Amino acid sequence: MPIPSSILAVRFLLGMVALSVGPLVVWEALRAWGFVPAAPTLAENVEGSCVALLVSALFVAVLAWRLPTAMPLRPVQVVAAVRVYATWLLPWVLLLVGYLWVVSIVPQRQLDYVVAAEFARPGYWLVVLVITLAAPFAEEVVFRGYLLGALLQPMGNRAAIATSAAVFGLGHGVEYALPTGVLGIIFGWLAVHRGLSAAMLAHALHNSITVAVHVLWPDTLDWLYRR
């Protein structure tokens, strides 16, 4: 029996609170307990925020276990998910390059961190783990599993995918809304047609490729963002 849209909408709001307010609460707790310095460096700031996001992602995992999403986490169709993502990768990259050369914005702090920080730094691989695995899992549960699921019944596939993608894009900041929103369309299509686990795989693959490209070729960060 399908989960009613109203119930999925409430679960989406709970998930959004976990992803937006949760990290702030954990961050303040880390500072109060002395795990984060009073005046943290940029690297310490990124590491602390990733610890906070990891805790929130774990909470979302528990939430998804107790309050199921609209789409079951069936076995992932690896080949299908990778094929769909690969098909759209080049057009998306061209969109991103064009967008960044028209709109002058700064890269996200996590990208600056993975490019500039030392691999031997204790928190480095935690940050990479959060970017490539924890964040994609939690965001797919909240934006596709709950929000998209809530919109499918009243709006239909196309409008629901587009609307949830727009919310997903804006959730990453107005300056990143367009390229991130387009990614949300890809992940949304996968969630509807190949299952939520396929969207999670594509999201994790995208974040992993992004990190790998900038780490292996750090000049791409300066070139893209014209710093």
Image: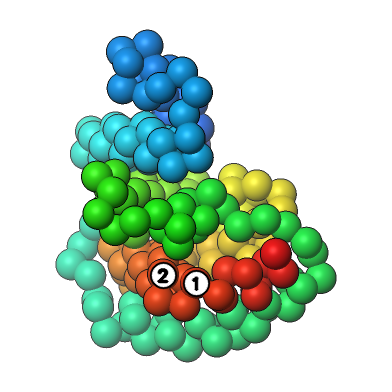
In the image, taking residue 155 as reference, residue 131 lies left or right, namely: left
Residue that label 2 marks: 215
Q: Whole-percent x and y of residue 226? A: 72, 69
Q: Nearer the viewer, residue 153 or 163?
A: 163
Q: Nearer the viewer, residue 218 or 156?
A: 218
Please identify the quarter of the rendering in which residue 74 is found. Answer: bottom left
Q: Residue at x 46, y 29 (%)?
A: 40
Q: CA distance from mark 2 to mark 1?
A: 5 Å
Looking at the image, the residue that sits furthest to the right is: 102
User: Which SS class for mark 1?
Assistant: loop
Q: Nearer the viewer, residue 54 or 226?
A: 226
For the question of whether residue 195 can be seen, the reply is: no
Q: Residue at x 26, y 37 (%)?
A: 58
Say which quadrant the C terminus sits in: bottom right
Q: Whole-percent x and y of residue 208? A: 36, 68
> What type is the residue that disc 1 sits on?
Pro
For the question of whether residue 119 can be seen, the reply is: yes
Q: Residue at x 34, y 81 (%)?
A: 82
Give the label on residue 218, or none.
1
Picture layout, residue 70 above or below residue 34? below
Q: Nearer the viewer, residue 61 or 226?
A: 226
Report if the CB atoms under discs 2 and 1 are less than 8 Å apart: yes
Picture layout, residue 35 above or below residue 46? above
